[in-house]
Image (tube, helix red, strand yellow):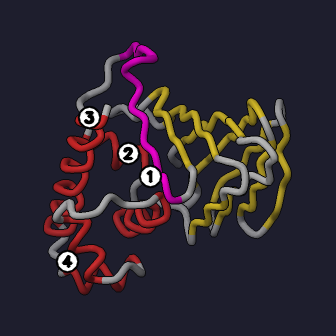
Amino acid sequence: MRDTMAELDVRLAERLAELRVDRGWSLEELASRSGISRSTLSRLERGEISPTAALLNKLCAAYERTMSWLLAEVESEPPQLVRAEAQPVWRDEESGFVRRSVSPPHPGLRGEVIEATLEAGADIAYDAPPVAGLEQHIWVLEGSLEITANGRGHTVEAGDCLRFRLWGASRFRCPGPAPVRYALLVVLP
C-alpha cells in the first residue's frame, strides 16, 4: 500500500505542476488564487510534501475541479466494475480523514460515490467548493456528523441523508465519541 500511495503522491505532484504550467501561471499567481504560500506550492509540486485535504481543496478551487476529478486524473482509467480491493484510498493523517473512491469519476459521467471516515474530534473546513453549485448527498452510515454548508448547520445521524448544492464555505466535524462513516455522492453541475 505504501508504494501505491508514494506513486500516487508523485503523480499528483506532477499533475499539479502541469495544471499550473498549462494555465501559464507562475507560483506567485497560483499562490494568489489559492491562498497557499509560494513555498508550500513549490514543495507540493516537487513532491517533497503530501497535500492535506484542506490544501487540495484550495487547489481544486483554483483549478475548478473536484478533489475526485483531480485524483482521477492521476489514477488509471477506472473500469465499469470497481472491485473493493481496487478502490483508491487516500488518507489525511493530520485531520483524521480517510476517503475511499467507491465509484471514481469517469469521463462522460457527472456523479461519483465516496466512502469517508472522520475520526472523533476531526474538523475540516473548506473555504469554497471546487466547483460552484456542486451537488452533494451525504448519507451517514455510522456515527454522527456536523455539517455546515452555505452558512447553515446540520447534525446528521446514522441513517440520515443531507443533500444540497454547495455555493459557499463548508465544514465537516465529527463530534464523537466514535468516528463517523458516511457515503458522499457528488454530482457536477
Q: Do the residues labelled 4 and 3 touch (CB within 8 Å)?
A: no
Check disc 4 and give the amino acid type. Trp
Numbered tag placed on residue 69 in the rendering: 2
Q: Name the front one of labels 4 and 3.
A: 3
**Disc on the earlier residue, 3 or 1:** 3
**Disc on the earlier residue, 2 or 3:** 3
- Label 3 SS: helix
Q: Position of residue 47 (x, y in %)?
A: 20, 60
Q: Residue tagged by mark 4?
A: 25
Kindly identify the residue that appears in the image at 70 percent across and 40 percent down. Answer: 138
The crowd level at tag 1 (other Cα within 10 Å; few <14, some 14-19, many 20+) is many
Q: Quadrant of residue 182?
A: top right
Q: Is residue 88 magenta?
A: yes
The crowd level at tag 3 (other Cα within 10 Å; few <14, some 14-19, many 20+) is few
Q: Are marks 2 and 1 in contact (CB under 8 Å)?
A: yes
Q: Residue tagged by mark 1?
A: 66
Numbered tag placed on residue 4 in the rendering: 3
